[in-house]
Image (tube, rainbow, N blue to C red):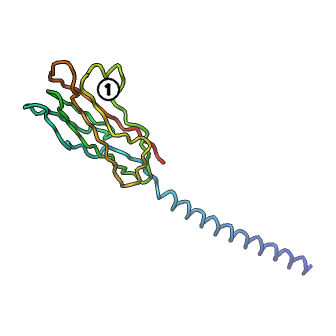
């Protein structure tokens, strides 16, 4: 009978030790999970600044322009007024990764896309071009610049003042 009681007590002690070890293991896992959940990854890529870099006049009248970052900071609205051949306006837009994870620039969406033949004829002989930044990776806290150039090309037509509205949008994804 004493043997039976000793075996039963030994089994109870082993089970209690197992429960204590499992409890300690679950506490350690819960703490590690909480630490991981507290370090939330944030994704935020925006246009942080737009500034006029230069303006070149092709005649006596200065070309004019305006640019502003719209509410959600993922779009820029611009207006260019070019008066004569060789007028040029250059803007530098700064894209900033304000998140905590790297971001990739998928594309810069132009509206209207003046590189498309349909729209290119509407503003001829003026061209609008941007720096190609597709596929660039922006680490957290870093910036990337994109150059936007509006240029009045020489042509056989008589120069006339042209006012052009233009928007660019930012398409990006987390890396």
Crowding near the residue tagged with mark 1, few <14, some 14–19, many ≥20 C-alpha atoms within 10 Å: some
Name the residue at 15% across, 23% down. Answer: 161
Query: In this orientation, which residue lies closer to the viewer: 51 or 28?
Result: 51
Query: In this orientation, which residue lies closer to the viewer: 157 or 35?
Result: 157
Q: Position of residue 123 (x, y in %)?
A: 25, 22
Say if 8 sits above or below 164 in the image.
below
Q: Residue furthest left?
A: 60
**Quadrant in the picture for residue 9:** bottom right
Q: Residue furthest front?
A: 156
Say if 119 sits above or below 42 in the image.
above
Q: Residue furthest bottom?
A: 2
Name the residue at 40% across, 50% down. Answer: 138
Query: In this orientation, which residue lies closer to the viewer: 27 or 56?
Result: 56
Q: Position of residue 37 (x, y in %)?
A: 51, 56
Q: Work out which quarter of the rendered image holds the N terminus and state it.
A: bottom right
Q: Does 134 sit left or right of 119 as displayed?
A: right
Q: Does 66 sit left or right of 103 as displayed?
A: left
Q: Position of residue 170 (x, y in %)?
A: 36, 38
Q: Does 147 sit left or right of 133 as displayed?
A: left
Name the residue at 26% across, 33% down. Answer: 77
Name the residue at 37% across, 33% down. Answer: 109
Q: Position of residue 48 (x, y in %)?
A: 29, 46
Q: Which residue is mark 1?
A: 114
Q: Which element carries disc 1, helix, strand or loop?
A: loop
Say if 168 sits above or below 49 in the image.
above
Q: How many marks?
A: 1
Query: In this orientation, which residue lies closer to the viewer: 66 or 174?
Result: 66
**Quadrant in the picture for residue 13:** bottom right
């Amino acid at each position: 009978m004493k043997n039976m009681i000793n075996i039963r007590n030994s089994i109870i002690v082993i089970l209690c030790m197992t429960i204590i070890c499992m409890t300690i293991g679950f506490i350690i896992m819960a703490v590690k999970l909480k630490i991981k959940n507290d370090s939330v990854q944030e994704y935020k890529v925006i246009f942080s600044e737009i500034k006029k870099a230069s303006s070149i006049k092709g005649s006596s009248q200065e070309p004019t322009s305006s640019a502003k970052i719209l509410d959600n900071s993922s779009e820029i609205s611009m207006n260019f007024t070019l008066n004569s051949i060789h007028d040029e306006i250059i803007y530098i837009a700064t894209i900033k990764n304000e998140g905590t994870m790297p971001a990739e620039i998928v594309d810069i969406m132009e509206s209207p896309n003046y590189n498309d033949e349909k729209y290119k004829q509407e503003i001829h002989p003026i061209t609008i071009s941007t720096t190609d930044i597709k596929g660039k990776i922006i680490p957290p806290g870093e910036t990337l610049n994109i150059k936007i150039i509006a240029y009045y090309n020489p042509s056989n037509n008589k120069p006339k003042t042209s006012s052009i509205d233009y928007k660019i949008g930012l398409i990006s994804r987390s890396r």
